[in-house]
Amino acid sequence: MVHSDLDELARRGLLRKFRGGVSAQPSTVFESNSEYRLNAHVEAKAAIARQALASLEPGMSILLDDSTSALALAKLLGEVTPLTVATNYLRAIDVLKDIEDVRLIAIGGDYSPTHDAFLGMPCLEAVERLTVDTTFVSTSAMTPELTFHQEPEVVMVKRAMLHSAQNRVLLMDSSKMPRTALHRLAPVTDYHRVIVDSGTPESTVEELRNRTQVDVAPL
C-alpha cells in the first residue's frame, strides 16, 4: 500500500522517487510541485511581496510568472488598483479575477499540472506580444552572478516575460541561494532590481549589489 501511495504522489508531481528513497525537495534537475512550494518559506515570500508592492502605482501594467512569490504579490494588488495584470499561473488567475479594478489577462497554453500553470508555444507567443511596465519573476536557484531553473520550457517563458517588460524585478527568498540548476535563465545584471528577505547572508547581498539594485525585505 505504501508503494502505491508513493507512486500516486510521484504521478502528481508532489515528490520524486530515486534509488533508495523519495524526496519533495528540489534538485538541480527537479523543481518541486506548485502545491509543495505554496507551503514553503511563506513568511519570506510575504515579506518580499510587501516590498515589491511599494514599487507599484495605480494605472501600471505588470506581468507575473508562475512562481509562488509572484502569487504572494498578486494577493496584495487590490491595494494599488487600477492595474492591468497578465499571468500564466492558474492560482494567480483565481486570485486576480476577484479583485475589483484589475484588468486580468490570462495567458493560456499547454497546462502543466506540476506548475499549475500554462506553458508551451501558445504561452510563449502570447507573452511575446505584450509590453508591460514591470515584470515580477522568481526562479528556483541563483548565485550572485546567474539565475537558473531546472526546466527549459519554464526558462523560455520566464525569458520572454523579462524581454516584454520595461522594468524587470526578481523576487528571491533566501532558501534559493546560493544554488544552481541545470539551465541558465539570465545573468543577475539583466534584472533592474532584486528583492530578497533578511535571511539572505550579508555577503550574498553585497555581491548582488555589485551587479544590480537590491532591496532586503524585513521578516
Image: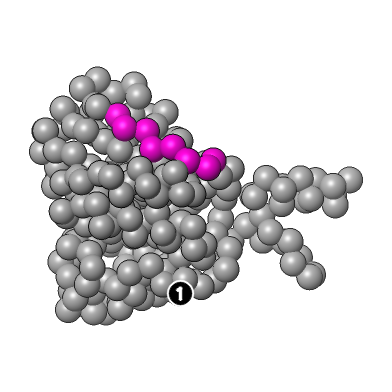
Regarding residue 171, the answer to whether it shows in the image is: no
The residue lying at 33 percent from left, 55 percent from top is 160
Classify residue 21 as left or right of residue 36. Answer: right
> Quick one: 143 or 104, which is closer to the camera?
104
Classify residue 168 as left or right of residue 108. Answer: left
Tell me which segment is drawn in magenta. Answer: 104-111
Q: Tell me, yes or no, whether the highlighted magenta stretch contains residue 149.
A: no
Q: Main secondary structure of the magenta part?
A: strand
> Quick one: 68 or 198, which is closer to the camera?
68
Picture quadrant where residue 168 is located = bottom left
* Mark 1 secondary-structure assignment: loop
> What quarter of the picture does the N terminus occupy?
top right
Regarding residue 116, the answer to whether it shows in the image is: yes
Instruction: Tell me where residue 154 appears, x and y as whole percent.
Output: 46, 56
Residue receiving disc 1? 180
> Quick one: 183 or 78, which is closer to the camera?
183
Amino acid type at mark 1: Thr
The residue lying at 30 percent from left, 38 percent from top is 86
